[in-house]
Every structure is written in C-alpha cells, then in structure tokens.
Amino acid sequence: MATAHTLTLPAESAEWALPSRRKIGVISLIVTETALFTIFAVAYLFYIGKSLTGPYPAQVLELPILATICLLGSSATIMLAERAFRREAKGSFRVWWLITIALALFFLYSTAFEWRRLIYQHHLTIATNLFGTSFYSLVGLHATHVVVGLTLLTLVFWLSLRGVVTRNHSEHIEMISWYWHFVDAVWVVVFTVVYIIGR
C-alpha cells in the first residue's frame, strides 16, 4: 500500500511559476496584430483586378528587393545584438543595435521614396482606385509598425549610451527583439501578397 512518503512529489516538480506578464502581453499583441494584418491582406487579395480605372499594380509597382534584404537582414542584426547583450558585451550590443536601426531607416526611406514615385509620377493615391486604397492601407499599416519598432530601437540605443540599460533589462531587449522579428515576418507576407501575387 502506498504511503504518504511515496506520494511526495519532488521539490522541483512542485515549483511552478506563471509566465512573465511581459511575455504574455507581447504574445497577445503579436496574435492580435497577426489577425489585423490577415484582414488587410485578404482585403488586398479580394480587390485585386477590381479597379475600374488605372493605374494598375503591374503598371506601377517595382520589386523593393534591396529594402526587403535590409529589413530581413535586420532580424539577424537584432539577434546578434541580443546575444551580445546577454554576454554583457556592451560595445558589440550597441554596434549591432545601431546597424538594426540603420537598416530600419533605409527600409522606411525606400517606402517613402516608393510612395513619392507612385503619387507624383503615377498619380496613385489612396483615393485613386481600389488598388490605391488597399495598397496604401496594407503597406502603410506595416510601415506604421516599422516606425513603432524603430522608435523602441532608438530609445533603447539612446538609453544604452547613457548607461541606463543593464542586464536587468534582458527581458525588455528580448521582447523588442520578438516584436521586430514579427514586423519582419509580416513583411514577407506583405511582399508576397502585394509584389508577387498582386502584380
């Protein structure tokens, strides 16, 4: 017959803690934003070819290859920055973090340049036709998320220069990294929907 002693659980089995509220919050944000982007992407696909007037995607869209390489490359640089932060290599952390910021800035510059070209050369605005409305809505939603991420990246870099960011902020850095990977992953979907399927 089993005794109370034989039913005792090991101490490590009994120790369980709730996941970090910060991680749960970021995961919830990512799930919610994924649903939002899905709605916009489906709307874009639904309205392909339904514009009654031009310009049409095939006439005006150019593949943003370099911008895409820079944005996806920033996922690698932020990962390297995060690793350097864990090793407490402050110099390496700042270098990789700054490169991530530079790549994000180039991506936003490329987006702004594309929009300027579409608006002034091809007269495509959000009110021109269904293509314009769905294009600026989807790409603009993504650009907004890049701006939010860039703001966080810049703030962390500035605080690290002032010596405010310490290893106690490891989870903060990790969560910003998660968000940035999400932004990059979403761009893969946006790029595929807008510049591959939608053309």
Image (tube, rainbow, N blue to C red):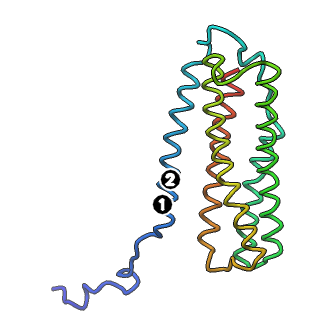
Which residue does the image show at 78% across and 74% down from the upper left? 161
Count up the numbered dots. Answer: 2
Other-residue count near label 1 (Cα within 10 Å), few / some / many at <14 / 14–19 / ≥20:
few
Which three-letter amino acid code belongs to the residue tagged 2? Leu
Using the image, determine if residue 113 lies above or below residue 120.
below
Q: Tags 2 and 1 in contact by the CB under 8 Å rule?
A: yes
- Residue 61, by quadrant, is top right
**Secondary structure at numbered mark 2:** helix
Residue 109's disc is none
Amino acid found under the numbered disc labelled 1: Gly
Q: Position of residue 108 (x, y in %)?
A: 76, 44
* Mark linked to residue 29: 2
Depth check, front residue: 103 or 15: 103
Report helix, strand or loop for mark 1. Answer: helix
Q: Which mark is residue 25?
A: 1
Q: Position of residue 35 (x, y in %)?
A: 49, 41
Distance in Å between CA atoms under marks 2 and 1: 6 Å
Quadrant hosting residue 154: bottom right
Residue projecting furthest to the left = 1
Residue at 70% over, 64% down: 155
Image quarter of the N terminus? bottom left
Q: Residue at x 80, y 51 (%)?
A: 103
